[in-house]
Amino acid sequence: METFTPMSTTLIVDSACDLPRAFIDKYDVRLMPAIIKYDNEFLHDQRDPTQTIHIYESGVLDKSHDSESAPTPISDIQHLLEALIKEGKTDILIQTVNRARSPTFEHATDATNRALRKLGGEYKVSVRVQDSRTVLAGQGVLAAHTVALIRKGVSGTALRRKVDRLSSKVHSYQIPADLFYLRERARKKGDNSISWLGALLGRALSVFPLVLALDDKTFPVDKIRGYDQAVDKLLSHSIEKLKAGLLSPFICVSYAGHLDDIVGRPMFQKLQSEAKHQKVHVIVTPMSLSGGVNLGPRTLSVAFACEPYRWEK
C-alpha cells in the first residue's frame, strides 16, 4: 500500500485546472472555484465529476442557452489564504490558468497582498503566485508534476524554478466540437477571430480545428476532416510524442462530456498501454466547467510536456 507523506508546500489551483477531484482530495490540493452562470443559475465549480457530467449532458451549456464563466473573486481567494495560514501552512504556491486568458492570476496576486497585509506579519509564511502559461489539460499536467516534486521534498525557490521551466514546454491541445459555439462564446468576449463564414464552412465540411496552447500563446496547428478522425489523430500524435520521450511522467486528458466517449476508443487504449510501458501516468478527467463553457460540450483536451516542435500535418 502506498504511504502518504503530508506535503511541505500547499498547492492551490483554480478549477480550470483539469485534474480529477479524487486527485485533488488525495494530495490535499486546494481549489479556487470559478463561478459558472447558466440560464440565470450560478454555481461554484468544485470539480465534482457527477455534477460536471450532468451539466454537460443536460444541454444547458449549448449555444441556445446563456452561459458564461467568471474567475474566483478576490475576496474568496483572500479568505482561503487566511484560513490556510491560520492552519499553520508556511509555504503556499498558487498556480493559475494562463494569465493571458483569465484575470485569475491578478485576482490571486491581489488576494495574497491583502491577506498578508491583514495578518500584519503575525505569521511566518511564504506565498507565491505562479502563471501556469497553459490551460485545461495542460494546467493539469503542470499541477500533477508540481505535486510529484513536492512529494520528493522539493520546495521553496527550487520548486518554483523547476515548475516555471517546465511550464513553457507544456503542450495543451484542444479539439472543439462546434465552431458555431466557439464563435458565439468568443464574440461575447470581443474576439472575432472565428468568422461566421468560417464557422459555416467548418460545419458544412465537418472540419475541426486542432488548437495548441503553448507558452502563453494559443493558435491552430491543423484542420482535420471528421470529429472522430481529429480525436484519433491527436491521440495517435500523443503516442508518438510519448515514445519519443516526455519531460514529465504525466499526460492529462480532459473531455467536456461523459468520459466513456474517450476511454472506450481503441486509440485511447493504445495510449494507455504505451504509457504503462513507459511508466507514464495518464490522468483522465471531465473538463472544467469554465473550459466547457468557453469551448463547448464534447471538446477534448490532451496535454503533455516536451521540447517545442513543429506540428507536421
Image: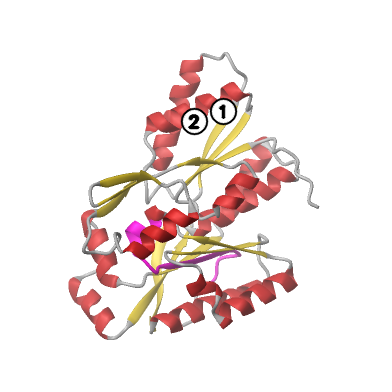
Q: Nearer the viewer, residue 183 or 258?
A: 258
Q: Is residue 75 above or below residue 287?
A: above
Q: Nearer the viewer, residue 173 or 181?
A: 181
Residue 65, given in percent of the width and then of the height, sits at 22, 59
Is 245 in the magenta?
A: no
Quadrant housing residue 122 = top right
Locate residue 4 relative to residue 57 in the image: left or right.
right
Is 307 in the magenta?
A: yes
Quadrant housing residue 174 = bottom left
How many discs appear?
Answer: 2
Which residue is painted at 32% across and 83% down in the image?
A: 206
Colour style of the rendered protein structure: secondary structure
Q: Dot 2 lies on which element? A: helix
Quadrant housing residue 289 = bottom left
Locate residue 159 relative to residue 178 in the image: left or right.
right
Residue 20, given in percent of the width and then of the height, sits at 55, 55
Distance from the alpha carbon under mark 2 to that under mark 1: 6 Å
Residue 215, given in percent of the width and then of the height, sits at 48, 56
The disc placed on residue 80 is 2
Q: Nearer the viewer, residue 225 or 283?
A: 283
Q: Which residues are magenta?
A: 291-310
Q: Is residue 244 above or below residue 43?
A: below
The three-letter code of the residue at mark 1 reads Leu
Which residue is painted at 25% across and 70% down in the image?
A: 180
The three-letter code of the residue at mark 2 reads Leu
Which residue is painted at 70% across and 47% down in the image?
A: 149
Report the residue marked by disc 1: 84
Locate residue 1 relative to residue 123 in the image: left or right.
right
Q: Categorize mark 1 by other alpha carbons within 10 Å: few (<14), some (14-19), many (20+).
A: some
Question: Residues at badges 2 and 1 in contact (C-beta under 8 Å)?
Answer: yes
Residue 29 visible at all: yes
Which residue is painted at 56% across and 28% down in the image?
A: 84
